[in-house]
Image: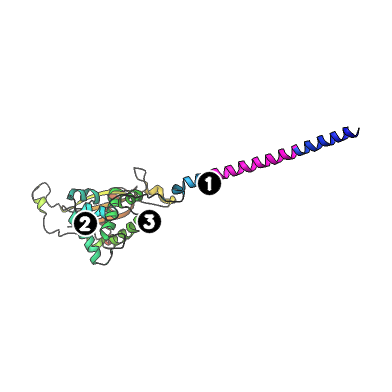
Amino acid sequence: MASESNVDDNLHVDEYIEKESSDDELLYMDDVDANFGKLMVLNYFVANKGSINGKTPCRTSFLTRKMYTLEILNGHPDVCYRNFCMQKHVFMNLCDILKEKGLLKDEKKVSVEEGVAIFMMIVGHTTRYNVIGDRFQHSNNTIHKWFKRVVRVVISIGTEIIRPTNQDIVHERILRKYPFFKDYIDAIDGTYVAVWAPALRQSSFRGRKTNVTLNLMLTCDFDMKFTFVYCGWEGTANDSRVFVDAVIRSSNNFSMP
């Protein structure tokens, strides 16, 4: 009987040892799995260190900053007109005027010529900041800053640029067309310019093209120079109504022979 009890005790001890060892093995396997997972994550970060921690350059064109502007200005005249919507000499005269008046000056990263080129490409081609930034290799913040800066200075000298010409002399182009255009001085037309308006007033600014716009009346001579610009009317306003208002109001100083 004593031997049988010893055998039972040994069996219980063996079972306890096996159970304890199996639990240890399970715990060890759990630790291995956890460490393996951590090791895999670590290997992933090490393998992709350049793409995670480093920044991939976005604007890598060889024509960095003002090199593109210089290439356009030193190239064919038609290329300058297509890109900047100005003849080369007109573009350079505008830049010189802005410099002489102290309205703009060269900075470390952007020159006056480059700033005016950015402004002309946005206005002339309705191009987005992202596209202009890729073209001139500048951030959107720099493009936005210079666009607003050039807009302000151009508006400030608007009264010097837009002014009536001598109307006492008949233009030579009219003389060639006598008598069909006898006594013609200027050409008048209207255009729509996209604007922002409060939500409560947008209905009056939506013209026939459903966009929120202003109806502008423009007058130019036969040298294609603007002599009068009248803006402020909503996009729904009729062209004749804008014209009558521009002529009747004495404060507009509408030039009439």
Q: Crowdedness of circle 2 by 10 Å Cα count: few (<14), some, many (20+)?
A: some
Number of numbered markers: 3
The residue at which mark 2 appears reads as 91
Q: Which residue is mark 1?
A: 42
Amino acid type, residue under disc 3 in the picture: Asn
- The structure residue drawn at horizontal position 88% and vertical position 33%, both measured from the top left corner, is 3
Q: CA distance from mark 3 to mark 1?
A: 37 Å
Residue type at the position of mark 1? Leu
Nearer-the-camera pick, 249 or 6: 6
Of the pair 122 and 217, the residue shown nearer to us? 122
| Residue found at the very far right of the displayed protein | 1
Left or right, residue 95 beside residue 27: left
Q: Amino acid at mark 2?
A: Phe
SS label for mark 2: helix
Q: Which mark is residue 141?
A: 3
Q: Position of residue 203 (x, y in %)?
A: 40, 47
Q: Position of residue 57 (x, y in %)?
A: 37, 50
Which quadrant of the structure image shows residue 221? bottom left
For image coordinates 26% across by 49% down, the residue present is 190
Which is more N-terminal, label 1 or label 3?
A: 1
The magenta-colored residue range is 18-42
Residue 38 magenta-drawn?
yes
The numbered mark, 2 or 1, whose residue comes first in the sequence reads: 1
Q: Residues within 10 Å of mark 3 (few under 14, many from 20)?
A: few
- SS class, disc 1: helix
For discs 3 and 1, the disc positioned in front in the rendered view: 1
Q: Mark 3 against mark 2, which lies toward the viewer?
A: 3
Ranked by sequence position, the earlier of labels 3 and 2 is 2
